[in-house]
Amino acid sequence: MNIKNIRQLNQQLASPQYNDAHSIVSWLGMMQAQDYRTMPWAVGLRMQKPSYSKVKGAFDAGRIIRMHLFRNTVQLVPGEDVRWMLSLCAEKAIRAEQGFYRSQGITIEETDITRSQEILRELLAGGRALSKESIKAEFELRNLNTDNHRMNLFLHRAEYDGLICSGPIDGRFATFALLEEQVPTKVEFSREEALAILARKYFRSHAPATLSDFQWWTGLTIKECREAVSHISSELSEFQHSDETYYVHTESRTRGYRKEIVHLLPPYDEYLIGYKTRHHAVAPEHQRKAHNNFGIFYPIVISDGKVVGNWNAKTELILFDVEKEADFSSAIEKYRKFK
């Protein structure tokens, strides 16, 4: 079984099945989204006909949400999934962030967090969306201490408490809106149901993948991940490769890959960051050019599932050793048209 080719099929990088931005994000479950400027491209390149306006439209309407969720990092998720995802990750994320600030000698009182959320509710009520800098200025007018650590904690905590989420796309800067206004429909599940849905979304879209990959992606405990997999065990098949057990979901595709597929992937793309190890896609000698050891992932060029270079916003390619000449022009043109 060719793992990298099947992953491309299930990640919608090869023969994509959808032409709707919300459907792409829903299929993948969640998508890493640290880089605000290239976030729409991560979705668009997986559409049958990439369309920036369709991605922006789904985002602005709250059908796609960007916020801190699993692993204390930023993800794109379907709006209807936000609340049940928070039920799985928020408590752990809040504890982890509090522990980090304590280790840095930074103390932030709960009274200040409560006050920050009262101000946020006032500022964003009525469908308003504001940038971090605009919110910071308003906090300062109300004499709320807003050094960078405190400002980040105020916003992260408001996300984990289900108060705020992403607002409409606005140029270079992220905006924030009230979750109850951006996504008024509440969809909630029991813990067991939520774990099952999370596992289903992951293994159908990232297959073939291991239990360790799933744990990395979610940041949940190994016990929780085993429980999640057990809830959907009847939907999974498995095989052994290099002493690892890989799972494939019944909804995953295993056939239909065509050769010579080339893509310009944005930084933090799911094709790499969705797995604990990336050896199927990145040769050891090129690993540091794809990502460093501190969690920074770079824009990469892939050809037939292998990382063969880097690229930048000007669509300049810096290629590694390529055994045969690939046609990168179509990938470049695809990106330019999307912009």
Image (tube, rainbow, N blue to C red):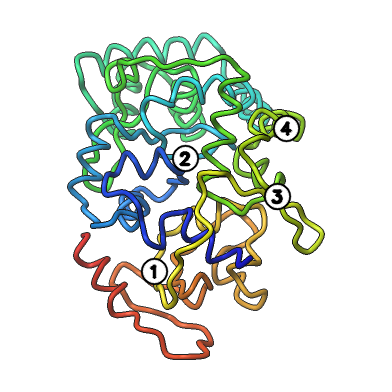
Count of numbered circles in the view: 4
For the residue marked with disc 1, what is the amino acid?
His
Residue annotated with mark 1:
263
Q: Residue at x 51, y 58 (%)?
A: 271
- Distance, label 1 to label 4, CA atoms, is 33 Å
State the mark number for residue 238.
3
Q: Residues within 10 Å of mark 3 (few under 14, many from 20)?
A: some
Residue drawn at (51%, 26%) of the image: 85
Q: Secondary structure at mark 4?
A: loop
Name the outermost residue toward the right.
243
Q: Report the Cα–Cα distance between label 3 and label 4.
A: 21 Å
Task: Return the disc, 1 or 4, that comes first in the chain's sequence.
Answer: 4
User: Which mark sits nearer the N-terminus, 2 or 3?
Assistant: 2
Q: Is residue 234 above or below residue 28?
A: above
Label 3 amino acid?
Answer: Glu
Q: Which label number is shown at residue 221?
A: 4
How far, Cα to Cα, is label 2 from label 1?
20 Å
Dot 4: within a 10 Å radius of its alpha carbon, few (fewer than 14), some, or many (20 or more) residues? few
Return the x and y of residue 191 as percentages of the image width and height.
61, 17
Q: Could you tell me which secondary element the residue under label 1 belongs to?
A: strand
Whichever of callouts 2 and 1 sits on the residue coming sooner in the sequence is 2
Above or below for 64 versus 110: below
What residue would you read off at disc 2?
30
Crowd rating for badge 2 (residues with CA inside 10 Å; few <14, some 14–19, many 20+): many
Which is nearer the eye, 88 or 288?
88
The alpha-carbon separation of the residues under discs 1 and 3 comes to 29 Å
